Image (cartoon, rainbow, N blue to C red):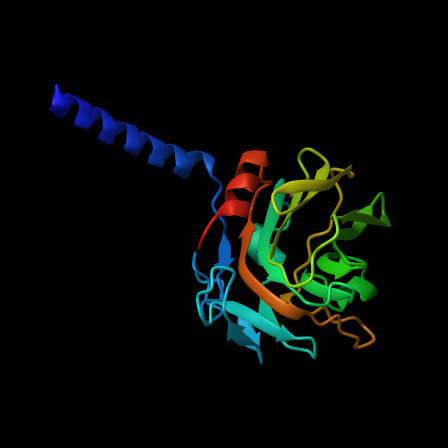
Amino acid sequence: MRNALLLALLLGSSLMLCADRVITPQPVAAWLFNGNTADAIDSLYATARDITYAADRHGAPAAAAQFNGRGQWVQAPSLEAMIGDNPDGWSLVLWFKTDKPERSMTLFSDSGVRQMDFGYGMNLDITGGKVRFSLRGERYNDIADYNLHSSPIQAGQWHCVIAVANRAGGMASLYLDGQLSEQLNFYRAFDYIDDDPCQIGQRVWSGGQSMAFDGLIDDMRVFPEALDTSAVKFYSEIRP
């Protein structure tokens, strides 16, 4: 009887693990910033531009990327290289902390100078003390903008932000600390995927301006699908 119970427990654990692998979406890229910009999933390496490292949200030393607001940034592969040029959906997850939420700063951008030149781009930034998730691209042969805003962020505190673009369902969503901040509908054939390199901690505009981030960024992940609410909960609570 005892052996039968042990076997049942082992089988139950194995099934739960298998279920996690099936129902929990896996990222195509994960930059944990554990003293470097290596991709923990595959070989989508990012290049550090003068950043340093500091303690992460769990207190581990040199395990979060530190930006000083003066042009430090990380260059990552293009969104197109990570998720393709016509995905049904995709998602971004990252943790950040700043003492200056009143400043306009970039967390993640795939637009680069092309946002001004050609009108395409996706940005995750801080403006007016909130996180803004913006999509800019082509709709009906014209340029369209979609902007979502989070609830206010707190200075000096770690926050988890999750941006979800569900093109198959025509819905964009922004979550802060696991809670839905805003959702909006957008045109399903909306074309916003850019093939320029992505930037973490800075966005360069055509005029040479930069929205440099001042603070810490930790544990950034890119998913080739739209995360559902259970996955949002899982990744907003996960420890690396």
Residue 57 position, x and y percent, is 52, 60
Which of these two is toward me, 239 or 212?
239
| Above or below 72: residue 200 | above
Q: Which residue, as the protein is rendered here, is positioned at the far top? A: 1
Q: Quadrant of the N terminus?
A: top left
Q: Position of residue 201 (x, y in %)?
A: 65, 68
Q: Is residue 7 above or below residue 110?
A: above
Image quarter (top left, top right, bottom left or bottom right) of the C terminus: bottom left
Q: Is residue 62 left or right of residue 125?
A: left
> Would you identify the image quadrant in which residue 206 lies?
bottom right
Say left or right for 182 vs 9: right
Give the image location of residue 197, x and y in percent.
63, 66
Pick the front one: 176 or 50: 176
Please state if 131 lies on the left or on the right of 21 as rendered: right
Counting labels gives: 0
Residue lying furthest right: 142
Q: Residue at x 62, y 59 (%)?
A: 157
| x, y percent for residue 109 | 68, 61
Which residue does the image show at 70% across and 79% down from the upper left? 70
Does residue 46 appear anywhere in the picture?
no
Q: Is any part of residue 29 visible from this angle?
A: yes
Q: Is residue 198 above or below residue 222?
A: below
Relative to residue 146, is residue 96 drawn left or right?
Answer: left
